[in-house]
Structures are given as structure tokens and as C-alpha cells.
Amino acid sequence: MTRIARMMRRLGVAVLLAAGCLQAPVATATPMNRELGHVGRWITDADGRVVTLHGVNLVYKYPPFHPAAGGFGDRDAAFLAAHGINAVRLGFAWSAVEPRPGVYDDRYIAQIEDTQQVLARHGIYSLVDSHQDAFNKSVGASWDGFPDWATFSDGLPPGPIQGLFAAYTLSPAQNRTWANFWHDHPAPDGVGVQEHYAAMWSHVAQRFSGERYVLGYDLINEPWPGITQPTCLLDGCPDFTRDTLAVLEAKAMTAIRQVDPRHLLFYEPFVTTDFGSPVRMPNPTGDPRAGMSFHDYCLGPIRTCPGNGFDSTRAADTAGIVTEFGATQDTATLERVTGSMDDAMASWMLWSSTQNQLPGHSQQPPTGPDLVSPTGPIVRPYPQVVAGTPQGWHFDPGTATFDLRYTTARPDSGRPFAGDLRTQVYLPAADYPNGYRVDVHGADVVSAPNAELLQLRTTPGQSAVQLTVTRR
């Protein structure tokens, strides 16, 4: 009996796969079920497998406010899918959806839907996102994410200093506008701006409720607390978050649920949490199909951004996704952040440098160099689907060594998976130019040698799987 045969008999679990060695049965990919939910912190497909998402943002900030106008199309979606990107945060502008109070532009919504369908054809999930930065141009923003008719600055000046953070922190008009928004100021038709916002969300969600490969809805991008900002920076302003921000997002959640009972709802905390402030955001309605969208722009050695977010989602028993990080082409920073999110077993979506659309700087699709290069830290090995409960994974970019550990128990019941469901690990060809070796205990490899999508089938009777992939 050979050493490998003895090992397989003793453990029932060891496979060493290399060219000219063992030949495993080759299987076609078992795709993620199109409908996603969650079990506690884990995003899951309808079969109960744990899904991890690596994605990018698609938010186009100048008229006509949709990705196709910026050149995004089928070839770009194919590029993303070919490089392991399985999710997109697909932004729209409230100002474009509802140009006048109660009047909706369905042609604009159809443009967003067209891009979602392009992504779906390539198996990419869309998180439909209501996006703004600093409310509106008239109060210091660089673009009109929210409409003019919902902007009430009471005649205060926007301030002499330009730029996003100056607008947030120093603009009297900015802070008064948010205060009026939080107090549900009447729109010109006499209906509160928050009621308009919720009704707008219902109108949008109705369009996507029957679409496949919709991850869910991101309710608001980086809401600003206004003049309470110092308190939020220090302690997360739990009372204001609960009594004001959560109330707005609850209205949106309730409105969406009237037209779409299936897709996940992702609430979002104040923008102050992007930089490491405590996250005090509750699940606004207690919806069992809810998660939290939050961002990681911590600087230098600060590590609290993702940690605070995941502490909050664990406490609320909801799923969490880091829907923005990056906004840089510094590979060391991106390597550090993606590595820390691997440690947290997190799903994430990159904000690429070209997403920062400015006058004279046309926004480009996040492909090729705009994706920080297919050989950079964004395109990296990760478990796209796990037929079990992940215990941890790690990628060493210097040696291209990837390790994954998971139990074979379902995260919802603790019982083993039934049937022939597979674990799927994305392994970029750029990291393994001459192929790879696989050492796995507790499962059999059922994909072709050196396939970019490594597939594992649990060995009967095994309670845990340990995988190591090394470069040939």
C-alpha cells in the first residue's frame, strides 16, 4: 500500500492533486442558488450553503446617473465574473428616480434594471443602492444624489470650503438640510420628505422584486447626523441613531416589504462609523431578512471599522457586508484591508479609484486597471460557496498559499448537508500561473486539475474539512 493510499485509508480525507498524480472525477460547477438569504451572520443560498461575496461599486454620479451611460456593458460584466467578482453595489440617484414630488421616471429605473440584468447574465448579484454624498449640490455636495425639492437649508450658506468632508463638517446649509430631513420637513406638496423617500423605495423595489440575482436593497448611503456629529464620532450617538436614523430606514423597509417580501434589506449606520466610531445601529424593524451595509475607511493602524460593524451585526443576528472600502490604488493599503476582511470572513465591495467622479475626470467601469489590476490584492482566492460553516480562511500573497477550514454542519441546523452540494473556491490563474497543488482533508476534489473554480465534495462521515492550496 502506498503512503498516499495509507493516508487516505487512515483519514478517509487526504487528497494531493498535481499533474500526473491522482485523477479526481471532474464535475461541472454547482452554481449558487439565485435567491440569497442569511442565517445569523452568514449570507446563504437557498440550499443553505454559506456565500461569500467579493464585489465592486457601480455608482454613476453625473447625469444621466446610470452605468451604461459611462460605458458599462456586457464585456465589463464578463470581465468582473472572470476575475472572481460575484457582486455589485448598483447605485441610483433619488433625484433621477423622482424628479418632482410623487412623479417617477420609469425610463431611468429601467436603465438601472438593464444593468442589473446584464450582471445577472454573468451570475453577478446586485445590491440596489440609493446613493448620495452630502445630499445635494446646493449644500456643498459634488453631485445631486438627493433632489432639489427635498433640500431645505433655510437660506443658510453652503460654506466657503469645497470638498466632501468640509461640506459635512463645516457647511451650515449642509447640517441644516440634514436636520430638516431628520425632522421630516414637508415637501412642496405637503408630504414629508421621509414619506417621499419611503414611497420612492417602494416604487424602485417593485421593479426589482421579480428579478434574479438581486442580493437586496441598500437603504441609504452614508447618512450624516448633522450638528450631532461630534457625539457620533465619540460614542456612535445611540439615542439619535435609534430614534432618528432607524426611524427613517424603518419607513423604507416597511415600504419595500409591501412590494417585495423576499430580497434582503440592508440598513446602514451614520457615515461617522466609516472611520472607526462605534456602530449603534439596530435592525430598524427587526425584519428577519435584514443585514447591515457599512464601510471601512479606517486610516493607518486603526482596525475598528470592520470589527465594530460585525460586532453590531452579531448582536442583531443579522448579516453584514462591507459595501465600501479602498478609494485608493495603494496596493499595500488594499492588501492590508482585504487581508483583515479575510480574517473576519467578510463579504465586501470595493470602491475603485475611478468611482470618485469629478469634473474633467470621466468615470470608467471598474475593469482592467480600474479594478486595481487583475494581479492585485482585489482579485484573490476566496470561498465563494461553502457546504458547511466556515471557521476561517487566509491567503498569503507572497507564496500564493491559501488555507480554508470549515465544518460540514449546516449553519441553520448544525446537521450535515444532504445530497451532493459542493464547496466552491475561486483560485485566480494570475496567482497560480503554472497550476496549483491541493491538500485537503475531509473532502474530495471533483473539479478538473488547476480549474479556477475548485470544487470540493465532503467525504461521507466527515465533520470538518481543511484545505491548503499551494503554487506549483
Image (cartoon, rainbow, N blue to C red):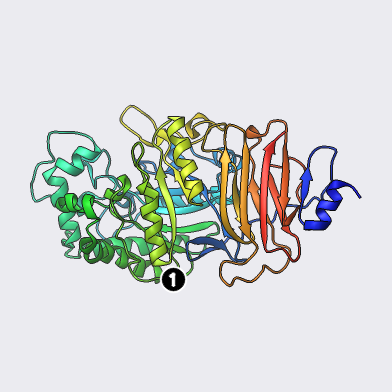
Image quadrant for the C terminus? top right
The residue carrying mark 1 is 288
Q: Is residue 244 above or below residue 372?
A: below
Instruction: From the viewer's perspective, tell me whether residue 169 is left or right of residue 351.
Output: left
Residue at 48% of width from left, 41% of height from top?
338
**Rendering quarter of residue 62:** top left
Secondary structure beneath label 1: loop
Give 461 or 113, whichever is nearer the viewer.
461
Could you tell me if residue 139 is visible in this image? no
Amino acid type, callout 1 = Pro
Looking at the image, the residue that sits furthest to the right is: 1
Q: Quadrant of residue 65?
A: top left
The total number of labels drawn is 1
- 468 or 269, which lies in front? 468
> Residue 159 appears at what percent x and percent y?
12, 38
Pick out the residue farthest to the left.
Answer: 155
The x, y position of residue 142, in whole percent, is 26, 38
From the viewer's perspective, tell me whether residue 217 is left or right of residue 245.
right
Residue visible at 68% across and 38% down in the picture: 470
Q: Percent position (x, y) of residue 269? A: 31, 56
234 left or right, relative to 438 = left
From the top left corner, tell me how far across and down residue 201 is, in percent. 35, 61
